[in-house]
Image: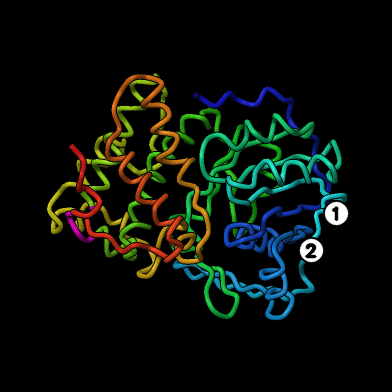
Amino acid sequence: MSQPQNSNPPPKQFPEGSKIVVAGAGSIGCFVGGLLAAQGHKVCLWGRARIIDAIQEKGLQLSDGDGLDIKLAAEQLELSTDASCLAQADIVLLAAKSLVTEEIAKDIALHAPKQAVVLSLQNGIRNPAILREHLEQKVFATMIPFNVVHSEGNRFHRATFSAELMMEWQPALAKFLSGEYINFKPLEQFNEIAWGKLLLNINNAVNALGGLPLKQQLMNRQWRCLMADVVSESLAVLSAAGIKHLSVAPVNMKMFCWILRLPTFMFSRIANSMLKVDPQARASMYEDLEQKRLTEIDEFQGLIIELSKQHHCKAPLNQRIYQLIKDAELRAAGSPALSVDDIRSGIF
């Protein structure tokens, strides 16, 4: 299941004025696209009418916990609800949910120039490979290490971690996109980093099921132990599958789990970086349940369960969480606001 490195040659040098189209401009797409526009790039946001109309009316506000506060007028961006906007793209940043990867790939294949470059900003491991199956364009994976919250006033707020994006080894492309507000860091060991990010994302479902802000969950040892158990179980599955990973946390993932299990007074002293999140920030999967949308659970717990079956090992906690999320999707009543005991019940 290890994601193969892209064997395509590096892209051309991009001249000033090259056009960037953000495909699937939701919270992440608007934030990244907005920062690129603020750096002087020519950016088109292609998304649903609900998002595009709001930008047309109110502009785009971008902020974070480190003092970033940018306001862009609608006139500083190109806005579209039609895939035909891809026709002039030099770079396509795909920020849509994994559920629509194949659908948007067909739009890119139909409209985008063959010499364009496609960057997948999506969660999970499998999206770049799906895109490469459908596209002639060069495709490179990019990892978003932060969470973005869309709030009143059409504000997109980075609630967690830094604004540095990690991407497959393409130094020229990374240099072209990087600037004052956002940095793209090319990595030679990107695949291992992507699996490391998955091990953190595996707890998005825990947050969605509990419905609490991330910081509140992290300050509760019961919730932290549950998170540690989910990651530990997933680590065992990756080990059985022979999949290497590199931690995107400041420590390796085994130490990360040990820190999570510490008493709260010790955890709060040691894990300062983990607690530097917006007090109201929640995982995007929580937002999906609240908005009665399907989640990306198949790219997180679903992938771990598939690997466990292929390599004859057990993942009961991941299986339990997967089923609870699927049940919540079917009920379409938002987060079920479960307790830790609710989540653990029925696991033997």
Report the colour scheme: rainbow
In the image, what residue occupies the spot 36% across and 26% down? Answer: 308
Q: Amino acid under label 2?
A: Ser
Above or below residue 195? Residue 162 is below
Taking the image as drawn, is residue 197 in sight? Answer: no
- CA–CA distance in space, label 2 to label 1: 9 Å
The residue range painted magenta reads 219-223
Image: 99 above or below 171: below
In the picture provided, is 90 more to the left or to the right than 32? Answer: right
Q: Answer yes or no: do the residues labelled 2 and 1 have beta carbons within 8 Å?
A: yes
Would you say 214 lies left or right of 45 here? left
Q: Residue at 70%, 29% (x, y): give it.
A: 133
Residue for point 38% across, 44% down: 322
Q: Is residue 217 above or below residue 246?
A: below
Question: Tag 2, which secondary structure?
Answer: strand
Q: Which residue is mark 1?
A: 84
What residue is disc 2 on? 80
Q: Is residue 75 left or right of residue 250?
A: right
Quadrant housing residue 59: bottom right
Q: Quadrant of residue 251?
A: top left
Residue 114 % position (x, y): 85, 36
Badge 1 amino acid: Ser
Q: Nearer the viewer, residue 242 or 50?
A: 50
Query: Magenta stretch mostly in which secondary structure?
Result: helix
Q: Position of residue 170 (x, y in %)?
A: 66, 34
Give the quadrant of the C terminus: top left
Q: Is residue 224 magenta?
A: no
State the SS at label 1.
Answer: helix
